[in-house]
Image: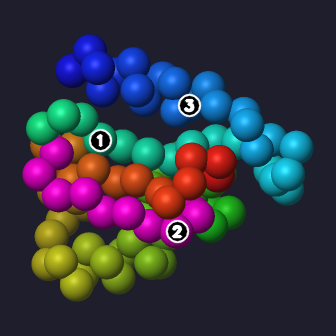
Amino acid sequence: MQQSSALLKNISLCVLCAEKLPNPPKPVVRFDEHSKIMIIGQAPGRKVHNLGIPWMDASGKELRRWLNISEDEFYNTENFALVPMGFCF
């Protein structure tokens, strides 16, 4: 758990792309070392960026419907790691 916490902290502090983005960097990622499935998405939309919760929009609702799982199951990091393709958003 200590390694994943350190990695999450490093990701959250990254500002490499800050000058090139329309919004301040706010990586939206959730995982731990026990995650069984990793879902990698594209850059989050404005709603997700503002909320800071991955897939908390219409696309996430549709994805959970396709997977036939509840929000609680989806956001349990022992079940799913939720990672964007880039951490700049």
Q: Which residue is mark 3?
A: 12
For the residue pair 26 and 70, the one nearer the viewer reads as 26
Q: Residue at x 24, y 81 (%)?
A: 65
Residue 51 seen: no
Say which element carries label 1: loop
Quadrant in the picture for residue 18: top right
Q: CA distance from mark 3 to mark 2?
A: 17 Å
Q: Type of residue at label 2?
A: Gln
* Range of magenta residues: 35-44
In primary-sequence order, the first of circles 3 and 2 is: 3
Q: Quadrant of the N terminus?
A: top left
Q: Residues within 10 Å of mark 2 (few under 14, many from 20)?
A: few
In primary-sequence order, the first of circles 1 and 2 is: 1
Q: Are marks 1 and 2 in contact (CB under 8 Å)?
A: no
Q: Which residue is mark 2?
A: 42
Say which element carries label 3: helix
Q: Which residue is mark 1?
A: 31
Q: Residue at x 30, y 63 (%)?
A: 39
Q: Type of residue at label 3?
A: Ser
Q: Residues within 10 Å of mark 1 (few under 14, many from 20)?
A: many
Say which element carries label 2: loop
In primary-sequence order, the first of circles 3 and 1 is: 3
